[in-house]
């Protein structure tokens, strides 16, 4: 039976060569550490060239890391393609010419409004002054009568469906659907068209008996 010898160390032939070398290991880390190994004759401190040892404060201030974080801002100027396919061009929103006859000031305004923008807001962005109050479609200060063209006003709560059918609209919540020509109305004109009938049914009769009962309860 063969005699089993002692297990051979595969790196034994290189051990003497390694021990003769003066190894200076440089490791990129933020702290100093020590490696101990049977193949090194003594412990070797590890120091990073980017973060000098705290024992030398002047080195820390003079040797800044070249890869220090820098914040930048950028803006996407053109559409980006994917896998070499050119990106589709942005969809252009149709625009329409809006003409407003301001009866109160005796001025005619002409300006262009995209289909997805409110008429009043777009006019103000172009330094055009038009009548308004609430800006939310709840009053009638910005009411106009449409002379030609079409517009959408799904948020116009200040006018009834009946008045909308008659061609009245609110500029603060109106979107043009085509070239549009409108005319402003007097401040309370649309309000009285809508609610005046409820206040024009004759004088209110006084009920003295009901008044006496109300005062007696107090």
Image (tube, rainbow, N blue to C red):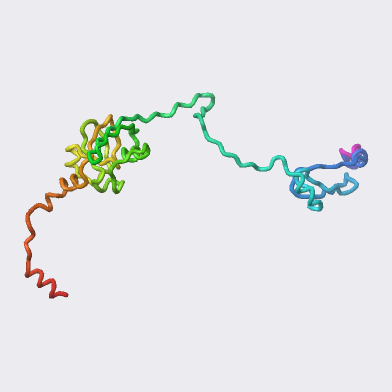
Position of 77 relative to 144 (above/below):
above
Left or right placement of residue 195 versus residue 15 in this view: left
Q: Residue at x 30, y 32 (%)?
A: 110
Residue 196 screen position, x and y as percent: 14, 49
Instruction: Please name whichever residue, 15 or 144, is drawn nearer the observer in this view of the structure.
Output: 144
The residue positioned 6% from the left and 70% from the top of the image is 209
Q: Position of residue 64 (x, y in %)?
A: 73, 44
Residue 3: horizontal and vertical position, in percent? 91, 39
> Left or right: 84 with respect to 17?
left
- Is 201 drawn above or below residue 215 in the view shown? above
Q: Residue at x 31, y 46 (%)?
A: 135
State the residue in front, 14 or 140. 140
Range of residues picked out in magenta = 10-14
Task: Work out whether residue 105 can be spotted.
Answer: yes
Q: Quadrant of the C terminus?
A: bottom left
Residue 186 is a magenta residue: no
């Amino acid at each position: 039976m063969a005699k089993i010898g002692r297990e051979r160390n595969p790196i034994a032939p290189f051990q003497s060569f390694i021990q003769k070398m003066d190894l200076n290991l440089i490791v990129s880390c933020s702290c100093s550490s020590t490696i101990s190994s049977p193949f090194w004759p003594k412990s070797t401190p590890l120091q990073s060239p980017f973060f000098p040892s705290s024992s030398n404060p002047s080195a820390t201030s003079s040797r800044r890391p070249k890869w220090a974080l820098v914040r930048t801002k950028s803006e996407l100027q053109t559409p980006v393609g994917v896998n070499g396919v050119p990106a589709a061009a942005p969809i252009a929103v149709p625009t329409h010419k809006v003409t407003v006859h301001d009866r109160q000031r005796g001025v005619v305004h002409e300006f262009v409004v995209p289909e997805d923008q409110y008429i009043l807001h777009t006019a103000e962005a172009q330094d055009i002054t038009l009548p308004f109050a609430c800006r939310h479609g709840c009053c009638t200060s910005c009411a106009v009568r449409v002379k030609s063209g079409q517009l959408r006003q799904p948020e116009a709560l200040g006018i009834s469906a009946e008045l909308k059918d008659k061609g009245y609209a609110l500029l603060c919540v109106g979107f043009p659907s085509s070239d549009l020509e409108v005319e402003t109305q007097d401040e309370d004109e649309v309000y009285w068209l809508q609610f005046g009938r409820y206040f024009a049914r004759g004088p209110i009769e006084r009920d003295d008996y009901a008044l006496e009962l109300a005062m007696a309860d107090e």
